[in-house]
Image (spheres, coloured by chain):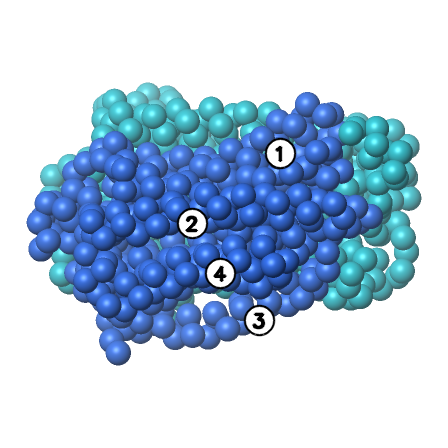
């Protein structure tokens, strides 16, 4: 297997990790103002992701770094092309990131309320726009012969990509609700479960619409592997809902997590070996070859990644182990 | 305004803003780690209180550093896509390694540190803040390896219309890194030290928690004194190094127009950039040669000759960076460094002789010196980056060729205004919180620690 393929897989893995981990952070953030009826409950909810959200976000930073290092043209075209969308995502991540720290630093209810809504807005915008971005990669955007994006912000919004955004928004909300059923205590668990059941009920038809639109708008289903994985993500979603109904919250969380994994994997598989599709001319698409770094750089980065990634996974797993217990309202830090 | 100018403004605004928080993170992480180590070694609860007090301030600052750092990571692709294409083969690697090696380390262990007070053995807990400190300082190393390539490209070949990496080892052992990294990190250590010194002085002046703040003062004083001496030394050697590798930058920093041997040093000058001369100057003969070569003779090339050389090498164009602002930023940095040396020496003397707390003027001066290292960080980086103009990558790519063609001026203006407004509002919130916690002191329950909110306190706000 050549290193260009390996790095394409690694980038996909980083985005899968980011969507899986930060997915429940986004979900928890979006549910915060609705599930938390009072300040104490809100604190419990925030503390459920408190020790891990920052580490989860580094998956995105690393994905960005990996794009830059392994596929500089992908990095350059994507970020200069999806300019305003990315700006909105960055704003979302900024206000959300400081909000966790700031909200706990003052007891004024208005202050806390403000930052709670910042957490909501930041999570909402990010969860929505990542779906828009990923579906755009696959559907194709106007890219010219020089790898330059020649569209504007509104080119990124089409019925297909909006359904894509709605999908990540809903799936992440479900992911967050299921995560909360495992991490908090008392009657909030039941509330989180009820929310998850309702959100799941909306999510299933949306994902089916997305599958249909993907069939119409993209060539994903011409690849048997990608098609199977895509269908798998829908199957896991239905499974998650059924498991939730039968009271198996833990298994439901895992099943919905697999929905995210399969969905992201399917999108990347559908792209391969392209990394950004040009809808002006198929020959102008960016691929893992014309967008990549030199073989030497890929080799260096492979050695670095293969050494470092296992170590990172090890200590991140250890964090989850240290904080494996449910959050009670006795030891709140935020 | 043109895309280029707007993109430059945006990079300047967001980078300088990000760099308000970074140096304090570099220094304060180490200081908090030292405080907690003292707690583990002595078992003295005062050190725990100290760790939690300064730890809370650290966390507020750290959050701002993290979120503004995300922007930096994506900036190159957003506004500088042609730069990214041209050097991505080299520049992307240290950025990716920074994330893998440093960002994961600091953010993961910070989560453990904040939430692990009553979940982990003391030693493991103290180890986690050391991991944060190591992670932060490692991230400085890798980003400065990347920046050093822009200042002094090494280990590459021009091929396929871009710069391609040929020697990773040369990249990470770029001689420029050996000046840039210690200079930056030690600047961060000074920032942390003056922060702790100033806050401790504030409370000592008010006879507030005297035992605790005497101890924190001493830790910061020793740490700060060493850092200040080292940073001025490293700064001087970096200056001498730049005379050889980036003579244009140093000549601009000295407003040195005409080649001379021995070269005079301009203490003050009124720069006339249009006519390429100083309309007024106070200079000392031979001193610039001495500063450059440790000897009162030696030729130091002037800006005019360097411009002629650059045109011969790279073709027609203006290769002289904005002299006036670089000249003054260099002087402000040096003055700030001088002030830090003087005040730490004086404080050390008063402390040794037991007169410190009887000299409120010095304690007050220390409180008001908190911004001084910030000023040095700012002006130092201004000189380093603006002094590189017109180059994006020294000798390889000009800034005007680096900007994104896909992005319109209107889009850059939109995001420039957006970032400025949001950053401005966050600065107000950040400043409000820091001042509040600093004034409050360690007595009040600080949320970072093992303190539990009493049921009454919780119900009060529901």
Locate the C terminus of chain A by quadrant: top right
Residue A272: percent from left, percent from top: 23, 63
Q: Viewed as shown, does residue B313 lie left or right of B249?
A: left
Q: Which residue is mark 1?
A: A33
Q: CA distance from mark 4 to mark 1?
A: 28 Å
Q: Which residue is mark 3?
A: A314
Chain letter for mark 4: A
Residue nearest the observer in this picture, B43 or B149: B43
Q: CA distance from mark 3 to mark 4?
A: 30 Å
Q: CA distance from mark 4 to mark 2?
A: 10 Å
Chain A appears what colour?
blue
Between discs 2 and 3, the one toward the N terminus: 2
Q: Is residue B388 visible?
A: no
Q: CA distance from mark 1 to mark 3?
A: 33 Å
Between discs 4 and 2, the one toward the N terminus: 2
Residue nearest the observer in this picture, B174 or A269: A269
Q: State the mark number for residue A239.
A: 4
Residue B59: percent from left, percent from top: 66, 44
Is disc 2 in contact with disc 1, using a CB cutoff of under 8 Å?
no
Q: Which residue is mark 2?
A: A204
Disc nearest the viewer among 4 and 1: 4
């Amino acid at each position: 297997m050549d290193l260009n393929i390996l790095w394409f897989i690694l980038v996909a893995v980083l985005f899968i990790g980011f969507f899986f981990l930060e997915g429940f952070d986004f979900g928890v953030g979006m549910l915060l103002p609705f599930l938390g009826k009072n300040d104490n409950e809100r604190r419990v909810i925030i503390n459920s992701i408190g020790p891990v959200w920052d580490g989860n976000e580094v998956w995105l930073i690393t994905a960005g770094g990996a794009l830059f290092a392994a596929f500089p043209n992908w990095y350059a075209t994507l970020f200069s092309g999806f300019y305003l969308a990315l700006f909105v995502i960055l704003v979302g991540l900024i206000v959300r990131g400081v909000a966790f720290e700031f909200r706990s630093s003052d007891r004024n209810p208005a202050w806390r309320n403000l930052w709670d809504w910042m957490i909501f807005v930041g999570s909402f915008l990010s969860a929505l726009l990542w779906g828009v971005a990923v579906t755009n990669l696959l559907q194709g955007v106007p890219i010219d012969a020089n790898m330059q994006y020649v569209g504007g912000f509104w080119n990124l919004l089409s019925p297909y990509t909006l359904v894509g955004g709605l999908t990540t928004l809903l799936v992440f909300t479900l992911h967050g609700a299921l995560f909360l059923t495992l991490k908090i205590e008392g009657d909030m668990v039941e509330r989180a479960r009820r929310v998850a059941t309702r959100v799941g009920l909306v999510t299933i038809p949306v994902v089916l619409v997305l599958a249909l639109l993907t069939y119409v708008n993209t060539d994903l289903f011409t690849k048997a592997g990608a098609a199977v994985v895509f269908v798998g993500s829908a199957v896991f979603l239905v499974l998650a809902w059924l498991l939730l109904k039968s009271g198996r919250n833990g298994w439901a969380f895992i099943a919905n997590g697999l929905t995210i994994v399969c969905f992201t994997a399917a999108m990347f598989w559908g792209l391969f070996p392209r990394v950004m599709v040009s809808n002006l001319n198929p020959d102008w698409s960016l691929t893992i070859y014309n967008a990549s770094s030199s073989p030497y750089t890929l080799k260096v980065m492979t050695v670095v990644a293969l050494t470092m990634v296992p170590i990172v996974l090890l200590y991140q797993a250890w964090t989850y182990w240290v904080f494996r217990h449910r959050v009670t309202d006795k030891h709140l830090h935020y | 305004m043109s895309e280029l100018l707007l993109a430059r403004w945006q990079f300047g605004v967001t980078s300088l803003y990000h760099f308000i928080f970074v140096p304090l993170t570099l220094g304060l992480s180490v200081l908090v780690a030292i405080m907690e180590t003292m707690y583990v070694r002595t078992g003295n609860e005062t050190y725990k209180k100290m760790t939690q007090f300064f730890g809370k301030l650290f966390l507020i600052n750290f959050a701002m550093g993290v979120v503004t750092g995300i922007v930096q990571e994506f900036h190159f692709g957003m506004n500088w896509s042609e730069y990214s294409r041209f050097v991505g083969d080299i520049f992307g690697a240290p950025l990716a390694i920074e994330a893998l090696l440093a960002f994961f380390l600091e953010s993961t262990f910070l989560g453990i540190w904040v939430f692990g007070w009553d979940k982990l053995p003391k030693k493991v807990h103290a180890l986690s803040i050391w991991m944060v400190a190591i992670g932060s300082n490692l991230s400085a190393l890798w980003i400065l390896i990347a920046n050093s390539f822009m200042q002094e490209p090494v280990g590459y070949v021009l091929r396929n219309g871009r710069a391609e990496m040929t020697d990773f080892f040369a990249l990470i052992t770029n001689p420029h890194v050996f000046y840039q990294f210690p200079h930056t990190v030690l600047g961060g250590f000074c920032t942390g030290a003056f922060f702790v010194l100033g806050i401790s002085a504030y409370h000592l002046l008010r006879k507030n928690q005297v035992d605790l703040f005497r101890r924190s003062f001493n830790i910061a004083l020793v740490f700060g004194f060493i850092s200040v001496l080292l940073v001025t030394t490293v700064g001087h050697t970096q200056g001498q190094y730049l005379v050889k590798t980036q003579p244009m930058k140093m000549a601009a920093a000295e407003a040195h127009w005409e080649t001379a041997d021995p070269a005079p040093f301009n203490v003050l000058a009124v720069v006339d950039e249009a006519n390429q001369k100083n309309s007024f100057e106070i200079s000392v003969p031979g001193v610039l040669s001495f500063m450059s070569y440790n000897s009162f003779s030696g030729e130091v090339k002037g800006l005019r000759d360097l411009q002629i050389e650059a045109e011969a090498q790279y073709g027609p164009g203006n290769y002289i960076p904005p002299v006036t602002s670089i000249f003054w930023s260099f002087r402000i940095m040096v003055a700030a460094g001088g002030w830090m040396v003087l005040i730490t020496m004086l404080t050390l003397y008063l402390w040794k002789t037991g007169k410190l707390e009887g000299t409120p003027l010095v304690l007050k001066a220390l409180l008001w010196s908190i911004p001084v290292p910030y000023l040095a960080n700012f002006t130092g980086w201004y000189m380093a980056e603006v002094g590189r103009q017109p180059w994006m990558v020294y000798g390889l790519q000009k800034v005007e060729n680096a900007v994104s063609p896909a992005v319109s001026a209107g889009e850059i203006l939109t995001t420039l205004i957006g970032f400025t407004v949001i950053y401005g509002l966050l600065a107000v919130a950040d400043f409000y919180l820091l001042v509040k916690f600093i004034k409050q002191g360690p007595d009040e329950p600080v949320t970072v620690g093992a303190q539990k909110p009493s049921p009454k306190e919780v119900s009060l706000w529901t």
